[in-house]
């Protein structure tokens, strides 16, 4: 993760947890959207590409939103990006301690 801020990094697909081309969905504040995780971990909503889940989510709902929580991955049990990020961090931590 980059730093410890609220927006640490693009949707992390570098270790294969979320492969490039994976479709994600957002339903929040009366809005809905579909997007795709790109090869560099950015998020493509329509023709626009966003560096972070929150930037992509904010573009859909029209104001600030925690994209890590609202974007979900239907192909991975409809889990949020936040849940998948936590899983990846736990995996990394267990590998480092081994």
Image (spheres, rainbow, N blue to C red):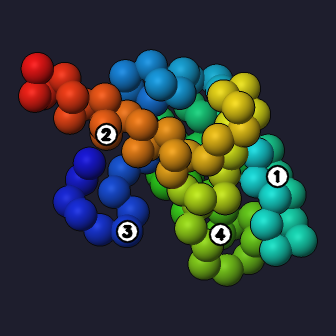
Q: Which residue is mark 1?
A: 33
Which residue is located at x 20 percent, y 35 percent?
93
Q: CA distance from mark 4 to mark 2?
A: 25 Å
Q: CA distance from mark 1 to mark 3?
A: 22 Å
Q: Earlier in the sequence, mark 2 or mark 3?
A: 3
**The C terminus sits in image quarter:** top left
Q: CA distance from mark 3 to mark 4?
A: 14 Å
Examine the rendered structure and indicate whether residue 86 appears above or below residue 4: above
- Left or right for 73, reference 93: right
Which residue is located at x 38 percent, y 26 percent?
14
The reply to whether residue 7 is visible in this rendering is: yes
Q: Earlier in the sequence, mark 4 or mark 1?
A: 1
Q: Which residue is mark 2?
A: 89
Examine the rendered structure and indicate whether residue 97 appears above or below residue 8: above
Q: Earlier in the sequence, mark 2 or mark 1?
A: 1
Q: Which residue is mark 3?
A: 6
Q: CA distance from mark 4 to mark 1?
A: 11 Å
Where residue 78 sits in the image (x, y, percent)? 72, 38
Please name whichever residue, 92 or 61, is drawn nearer the observer in this view of the structure. 92
Residue extending farthest to the left is 97
Which of discs 2 and 1 lies nearer the camera? The answer is 2
Q: CA distance from mark 2 to mark 3?
A: 15 Å
Where residue 46 sits in the image (x, y, percent)? 77, 45
Which residue is located at x 69 percent, y 66 percent?
59
Q: Earlier in the sequence, mark 4 or mark 2?
A: 4
Q: Residues within 10 Å of mark 3 (few under 14, many from 20)?
A: few
């Amino acid at each position: 993760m980059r730093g410890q801020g609220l927006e640490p990094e693009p949707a992390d697909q570098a270790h294969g947890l979320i492969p490039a081309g994976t479709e994600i969905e957002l339903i929040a504040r009366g809005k809905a959207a579909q997007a795709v995780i790109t090869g560099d971990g950015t998020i493509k909503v329509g023709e626009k590409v966003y560096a972070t889940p929150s930037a992509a989510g904010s573009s859909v709902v029209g104001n600030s939103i925690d994209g890590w929580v609202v974007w979900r991955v239907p192909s991975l049990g409809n889990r949020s990006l936040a849940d998948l990020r936590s899983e990846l961090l736990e995996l990394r931590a267990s590998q480092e301690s081994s």
